[in-house]
Amino acid sequence: MKATLITSFKDITPEGGILELVVWRLPAAVPPCIHRYKYRAVFVVNGERVIGFDNERGKGDHCHRQGQEQPYQFTGVDQLVEDLMTEVERWRSEH
């Protein structure tokens, strides 16, 4: 079984930022994750990632908020989208 693209979305926001989401379903989990998804969700402003969620081999699920990296509890694609948009709205309200 090969990886299957679940969703891929890219848009330019009113303030000129880039909002992008890509999610793949994998045949096996990427350690140390226990789920079978590979994802990246990012909000970039002026060429700088200000919000990001991803998982990578050896690191697992984590998020980036204005230069700080923190663990992230991935529970599903819908929640990932909601978490990304919540963080984007929080950033917008602060800037």
Image (cartoon, rainbow, N blue to C red):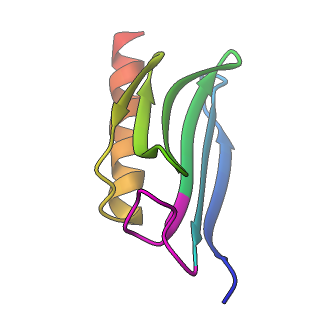
Q: Is residue 11 left or right of residue 91?
A: right
| Foreground pick, 63 / 13 | 63
User: Is 30 within the magenta?
Assistant: yes
With respect to residue 72, does 9 lie above or below? Answer: below
**Residue furthest to the bottom:** 1
Looking at the picture, how far across and down is residue 84, in whole percent?
Answer: 41, 42
- Give the residues drawn in magenta, as a range: 27-38
46 w.r.t. 76: above or below:
above
Please name whichever residue, 3 or 57, is drawn nearer the observer in this view of the structure.
57
Residue 63 highlighted magenta (yes or no): no
Q: Position of residue 65 (x, y in %)?
A: 42, 23
Q: Left or right of 37: which side holds 45?
A: right
Does residue 47 appear left or right of residue 42 in this picture?
Answer: right
Say which quadrant the C terminus sits in. Answer: top left
The answer to which of 84 and 68 lies nearer the viewer is 68
Q: Position of residue 41 (x, y in %)?
A: 54, 45
Q: Residue furthest top?
A: 95
